[in-house]
Amino acid sequence: MAFNGVDYYQLDELLSPEERMVRDTVREFVENEVIPIIEEAYQQAYFPMELVPKMAELGLFGMTLPQEYGCGGMNNMCYGLAMQELERGDSGVRSFASVQSSLVMYPIYAYGSEEQRRRWLPRLANAEVIGCFGLTEPDYGSNPAGMITTATKIDGGFLLNGAKMWITNGSIADVAVVWAKLDGEIRGFLVEKGMKGFSAPEMKNKHSLRASVTSELIFQDVEIPEENLLPNARGLKAPLSCLTQARYGIAWGAIGAAMACYDASVKYATTRIQFGKPIGAFQLVQEKLATMLTEITKGQLLCWRLAKLKDAGTLRPQQVSLAKRNNVAIALEIARLARDIHGANGITSEYPVMRHMLNLESVKTYEGTHDIHTLILGADITGIQAFSS
Amino acid sequence: MTILACISYVPDTAAKIGVTADGSGLELGGAKYILNPYDEFAIEEALLQRERHGGRVVALTVGSDAAKEILRTALAMGADSAVIIPATGLDSFGVAANIAAYAKAIDASLVLLGRQSIDHDSFQMASTVGALLGVPSISVVSKLEIESDRVRAERDIEGGKEVLEATLPLVVSVQKGINNPRYPKLPEIMKAKSKPIESVEPVAVSPRAAMVRYQVPQLKRANKILGDSDADIAEFVRLLHEEAKVI
């Protein structure tokens, strides 16, 4: 039976007809194009590249950026709803869209020159070009300020040396937005596939996000031309502002994964018969379903309000931290409960729940770990930062 | 070429629909309404024919104000303009008369419809509109080729295909398989909001059929559920043999 969403509090009434239509269109796209192929991709550990032109055609990349650059010109509610629906399919598919839009197109738009915007944004929007974002390093994850990737000034450009790790889309990207220290200051560089000394080997054997490409980026004396420096990005706040965009999408996406797990659980609990009745007749199962629905509803309200704040331009990054932290944690808990309700069936690819559960382990850690977001909130509450060295 | 794509607003296939106690009407509750699935093929075919032959696509619905939602979908998919004829409670003839009047007013060369609306399933729109316009109609078409004013249409029949030829102007109802309807592009959904939807006065005609009553089908057989013991299996075989008489 088709998926009709989870809307216990008539939150649809808070959306405009166009926002609902955007959501329903992406929902239908995911139902028809993603769900039929995703289990196989996950089991075989590849990213389904055939989705990329279809996603571009739909308008999923750069949804909120201006139309003059070939982008969507839509509001953040639409962007969030689209991320929610994509992640109902799979966190890896949503990750692809998050990286392309929030971590590649956004910094080029926000910190790039007019020439860089015109050169890259239309081709990223139509997915002629795929992008990735290199901030995290093997030894610098939660502490990106300590990065050791370095750019040095040479005649006509820069020489880049160092390595990045856990980079979504790295091996399939045509352009990487790479953050490196130039004279001790963090700057952004556009590193293009094929540049001498640049390689992006894929990281294999993951138990999570298996339908997504994760890579290392290695730079050995890579010559970057002057025009590939993002002129307006200086210091850590530039990459962090990109992460705020992506985390916003993740807060929504996690609800999509949770909705998929809840929906599967309701169907399973009402049809699986044990002791002569559906397992949904047992109080322990009902309690799990009630918890799932409650947490999803709360998470949806956080997202809705977050979108309103973002569209009003008053959003604070700490508010995004609260939503990312909460929604991913509850989505993971819901996925675990769903796996439990499904019993042994829950571990198979017949049901989406364990795939979501394993994906969400990554989502909990990437884009600021759960604990780091806790400390961001702690610092905001007390004025005392717990994670400075 | 002016192509008229006729679309209707119908309860979702998953909606649970009941009948009022006195049988005079339906209880739709909070049923979600959608674009009639067969009409998606009509819009797509209109857009494809426009891409091949030029011209414009007008999306039309006859119905309540809420049906504007599906006109916005048609606009987001790429229709050039959208028209609503605000009339409810019409019988099939009344709807056909309104479609035909509008098709005539805009001098449509091709009128496309879904093979049926999944609400009342009366299956008579294409032929009635054709008859009212005095032009040919071909129903349940799975392939449509147009060359100048000559049209070649394929219909699926038991074990094969039927190929028909006709000339424009023409009314065609389309079938699943004729094309793959495109998804509306997300930015076009937002743009569709600002496009006008024209409202055209309904044509008054006398109904040709009146609804007498609705009735819920009676379950003729009581289903039986057996267990999985050996005795149950023996009983299952006996029932298939003696009661259902299928083995």
Image: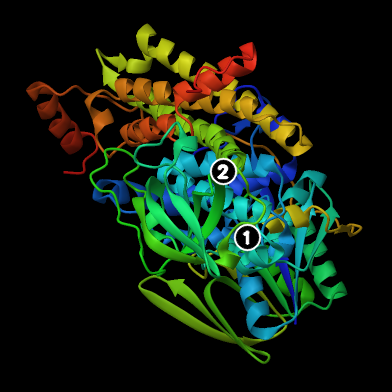
CA neighbours of label 1 inside 10 A, class few (<14), some (14 to 19), many (20+) = many
- Identify the element where label 1 is drawn: helix
Residue holding disc 1? B39
Residue depth check, mark 2 versus mark 1: number of the one nearer the observer: 2
Q: Badge 1 sits on which subunit?
A: B
* Residue drawn at point x = 44 percent, y = 41 percent: A147
Q: Are marks 2 and 1 on the same chain?
A: no
Image coordinates for residue B47, horizontal then vertical, percent: 65, 72
Residue holding disc 2? A239
- The answer to whether one can see residue A213 in this image is no
CB contact under 8 Å: marks 2 and 1: no
Query: Within the image, what quadrant is residue B57 found in?
Result: bottom right
CA neighbours of label 2 inside 10 A, class few (<14), some (14 to 19), many (20+) = many
Rendering colour mode: rainbow
- Residue B228 circle label: none
- The answer to whether one can see residue A347 in this image is yes
> In this rendering, is residue B135 above or below A172?
below
Kind of residue sitting beneath label 2: Pro
Q: Badge 2 sits on which subunit?
A: A
